[in-house]
Amino acid sequence: MPLSCNTPISSSQKALLTSEAFWSFSLSHYNKQGVQQAALELQDKHHGNVNLALLLIWLDSLDIHFSASHFSCLEVAFRQSDELLQTYRKLRKKIKNAQDPTLYQDALRFELQIEKQQQNDLINALLRIPLQVKTTEKSPSLLSDYCSRLNASSLLLSLELTSRPSN
């Protein structure tokens, strides 16, 4: 009889879900070949949130799951900073064409700070929802569920790559 996905994560597992650990994972995963391009396509063509996608990839790699009904809690968490990010991103792209590379680098650094804050907001929201250990391979990944919602399933493999930690 297959086990179900209803075993709550332990307090020690929950303690590992920090903003710093998520940021570190995100920087590493985003720099893998093909991930950045797929993430930008998810963002620009499917109106997805890259930080949410990275969070879901991270959770999938840790075999941590939550009910699909809790996606809305995470979406609310990034909504405010997402508007700021989108506005700032457009401004930064305009600055890129300016003759001042220092101004562009400053804008990029500030945008990364907003990204980091958005990740912190996502972690805070995540820690308020019931999290379970994924105990069966039959349930779809969190990222797969998110990509399906956005009609972006074609990006799934490029976004995931090998996100599982090595043993």
Image: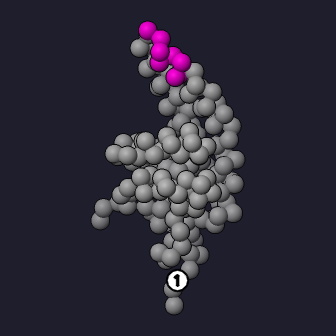
Q: Position of residue 79 (x, y in %)?
A: 68, 41
Residue 95 in sight: yes
Disc 1 on helix, strand or loop? Answer: loop
Q: Quadrant of residue 62?
A: bottom left
Q: Can you identify the residue that label 1 sits on?
A: 3
Q: Which residue is farthest bottom?
A: 1
The residue under label 1 is which amino acid type? Answer: Leu
Query: In the rendered view, would you say 95 is above or below 161?
Result: above
Q: Which residues are magenta?
A: 92-99
- At horizontal 36% and vertical 42% (from top left) the residue drawn is 31
* Residue 18 is covered by the magenta coloring: no
Q: Which residue is farthest top?
A: 99
- Dominant secondary structure of the magenta stretch? helix
Q: How many marks?
A: 1
In this picture, residue 79 sits left or right of residue 135? right
Considering depth in this image, is 68 or 22 the residue closer to the camera? 68
Q: Position of residue 123 (x, y in %)?
A: 57, 49
Q: Position of residue 91 (x, y in %)?
A: 57, 21
Considering depth in this image, is 93 or 122 the residue closer to the camera? 93
Classify 10 Å Cα crowding around label 1: few (below 14), some (14-19), many (20 and above): few
- At horizontal 66% and vertical 33% (from top left) the residue drawn is 83
Looking at the figure, which quarter contains the C terminus?
bottom left
- At horizontal 50% and vertical 43% (from top left) the residue drawn is 41
Q: Which residue is farthest left?
A: 167
Query: In the rendered view, would you say 78 is above or below 140?
Result: above
Query: In the rendered view, would you say 133 is above or below 155?
Result: below
Q: Position of residue 58 (x, y in %)?
A: 46, 55
Snapshot colouring = one colour
Considering depth in this image, is 86 or 164 the residue closer to the camera? 86
Residue 119 in sight: no
Considering depth in this image, is 103 or 9 the residue closer to the camera? 103
